[in-house]
Amino acid sequence: MRRLALICSVLSGVLLVLGLVEWATNYEWAAGDQDPLFGNSRIMLNDGMTVLIATGFLVVGSVIMWILALRRGQGDQRES
């Protein structure tokens, strides 16, 4: 569980940096590249904003995995 939490944390960190770079440059890297959010054609988002939304979900998942991994780690200790 810790290995999966670590992988998700690193991946979310990389995606967060990518999303923040696109936000800081006002999405100039992917200008004109827009997609609907969850298939809803009324909500059009740039790919940079889509990356930031996905990163938010991944961060929440990583935090939950770390909490579960640390809880299970406390119960594995044996008293001598």
Image (tube, helix red, strand yellow):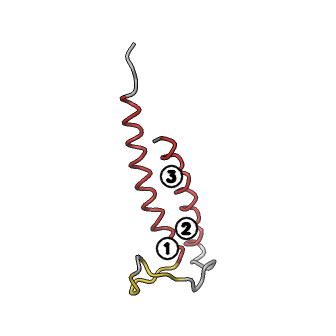
Eye-nearest disc, 1 or 3: 3
Tag 1: amino acid: Met
Tag 2: amino acid: Gly
Q: In the rendered structure, which disc, 2 or 3, sits on the residue that comes first in sequence?
A: 3
Name the image quarter holding residue 33: bottom right
Q: Residue at x 38, y 87 (%)?
A: 42
> Which sits in the foreground, 22 or 69?
69
Name the image quarter holding residue 25: bottom right
Q: Residue at x 55, y 62 (%)?
A: 15
For the N terminus, give its image quadrant: top left
For the C terminus, give its image quadrant: top left
Q: In the rendered structure, which disc, 1 or 2, sits on the residue that comes first in sequence?
A: 2
SS label for mark 2 = helix
Q: Residue at x 41, y 32 (%)?
A: 73
**Are the two marked residues, 1 and 2, in contact with CB atoms closer than 8 angstroms?**
yes
- Rate crowding at label 1 as few (under 14), some (14 to 19) or many (20 or more) other CA atoms within 10 Å: some
Q: Which residue is mark 2?
A: 19
| Marks 1/3: CA–CA distance | 19 Å
Tag 3: amino acid: Cys
Q: Which residue is mark 1?
A: 49
Query: Picture coordinates of residue 61 (x, y %)?
Result: 41, 54
Q: Which mark is residue 8?
A: 3
Name the image quarter holding residue 44: bottom left
Query: Picture coordinates of residue 21 (x, y %)?
Result: 59, 68
